[in-house]
Amino acid sequence: MNEHTWISPNCQVSKWILLRKSLANNDNNGEWSEAVEIFRDRLNNRFFTPIERLRDAEKSMELGFGFAMLTLDCLLIDTIESFREGRIKGSEKSTANAFKQFFSKSGILEKEFTNTLKRNFYDAIRCGLMHDGETRKGWLVWEQHPDPTKIVDKDQDGHIILYRNNFHKAIVGEFDRYTSELLSGELLSLRENFLKRMDAICGLAPASPEIIEYFAYGSNMNPERMFGRIKSALPNRVARLSGYRLVFNKRSVDGTAKANIERSSQEADFVLGCVY
């Protein structure tokens, strides 16, 4: 991962780094709107748009892509929960818990899925599709139910039926609710966890409890160059260092002179730079 890596179709790591510092202030709702838009852009590209294209294609081609769409929905659920949790790295255990938490937070899914169904969904649908390429425990996947709130049902033989279009609509609704909560800023922990996850995606080191400010001058004022040297560096502000002057008294290995700063005897002297 480097500063040129695209984390969404319209955002590179370098752009996130420039935006990141302002997001530490919970009052910067304008910057948070931009952060949420990057998040939406990422998930639209990876999940929402492919699911829509598959749904449109199966209508025109008279084919069924339900398993592919449902597999993407499972990945989508885990992705949303990874941001809610501030997950830096995952495991099967954390994934199983993520599905349980997601179903519990969604009003319509909580209403439709008992605790037993939540556990069975993870094994029969998520693990079945992703590991076996088929459902387990006799679960059936049907396109939709006339009642948009109906997501699971049973047939006359006791097989559980999952209406995948209605299920997807419930996920979309929960995603919209989550992004609305991020924009409102009422839950500080929700924003903090979002930042942890996005920083992990960008390869940034987890924030340290102790923040060290560094005065940069010369080429280190370029955020991309600084990030290449210190992954956790975040641009903060322009700064003026009084009582110092810029000199070129450092000899490089190639024989050229390099910039340096040193104390000056002239009180009026100063060096302009920026603080990370």
Image (tube, rainbow, N blue to C red):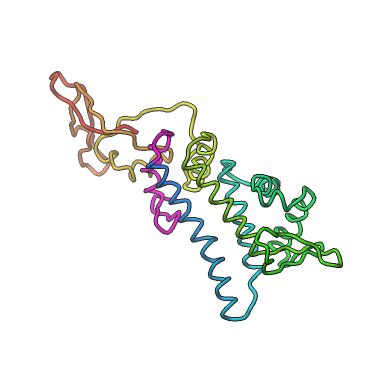
Query: Residue 54, how many percent across, how many down?
Result: 57, 71
Of the pair 21 and 205, the residue shown nearer to us: 21
Q: Give the vertical position of 208 relative to 56 (above or below).
A: above
Of the pair 28 and 24, the residue shown nearer to us: 28
Which quadrant would residue 241 be assigned to in this image?
top left
Is residue 149 located in the magenta-colored stretch of the structure?
no
Task: Give the residue at x 46% y 47%.
Answer: 202
Of the pair 116 and 221, the residue shown nearer to us: 116
* 60 displayed left or right of 241: right
Magenta stretch bounds: 1-29
Query: Residue 27, how many percent across, how many down?
Result: 41, 34
* 234 displayed left or right of 269: right
Query: Residue 147, how many percent across, how many down?
Result: 68, 63
Q: Quadrant of the C terminus?
A: top left
Task: Give the residue at x 82% y 66%.
Answer: 155
Of the pair 239 and 83, the residue shown nearer to us: 83
Is residue 21 located in the magenta-colored stretch of the structure?
yes
- State the count of labels: 0
Q: Give the vertical position of 99 relative to 193 (above or below).
A: below
Q: Residue furthest right?
A: 157
* 167 displayed left or right of 121: left
Query: Residue 42, how many percent across, how many down?
Result: 48, 55
Q: Note whether residue 169 is visible.
A: yes
Q: Residue furthest bottom?
A: 61
Task: Give the residue at x 42% y 50%.
Answer: 2
Q: Give the vertical position of 70 relative to 264 (above or below).
A: below
Task: Give the residue at x 43% y 51%.
Answer: 37
Q: Note whether residue 92 is visible.
A: no
